[in-house]
Amino acid sequence: MNTNNRVIKYHKKMKITLVSKIDENLVEFKSDLGCGVAIWDNSKSLSNTYYNIELEIDDFFEWGKNITLEKIPGYGFYLINNNMFFKAKVISCEDTGILVLSLGKDIIFIETSGTCEINSYVSFFTTSDNVMLFSIEL
């Protein structure tokens, strides 16, 4: 974990389809959970349409600002005006504000300004340039 209130969050082995390359770094992608835009790991060239990836989010989430409790259960992500929105289930909360979230079959960790109840659902968002995709070999 970083000490500057920014934490890299891990999302394991998601399968995506690359839709298009937007610029030197950003790509449009889709998966069973939704569609979005993120930074592509520059160490790998875009040679395939389908990839198994790790998704990282580099941001700090403040309750009432860029993270809220959800009343309707569900999982997924989508893009609106260069912001990536995520909806996930809380499976663990640390007193330090680290939330362990279920995003469908995958797990992600995010750092927040406080805790919340286990088994609740949250929505949170960040800009596309805070979301990174890394191709992995399975």
Image (spheres, rainbow, N blue to C red):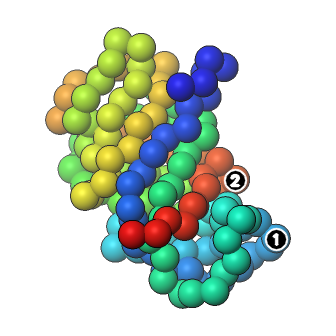
Residue for badge 2: 129
- Identify the residue shown where x is 45% and y is 45%: 10
Whole-percent x, y for residue 55 in the image: 50, 55
Residue that protrudes farthest toward the front in the picture: 137
Q: Is residue 88 visible?
A: no
For residue 124, side relative to residue 133 (left or right): left
Amino acid, disc 2: Asp
Q: Nearer the viewer, residue 74 or 11?
A: 11
Q: Image height check: is 96 above or below 31?
A: above
Which residue is drawn at the image coordinates 63% and 86% (left, top)? Answer: 47
- Residue at (32, 41) in percent of width and height: 101
Q: Which residue position is annotated with label 1?
A: 24
Work out whether 37 lies above or below 125. Answer: below
Residue 106 position within the rendered picture, expressed as x and y whole percent measured from the top left: 31, 54
The foreground one among 89 and 98 is: 98
- In what element is the residue under mark 1? loop
Q: Secondary structure at mark 2?
A: helix
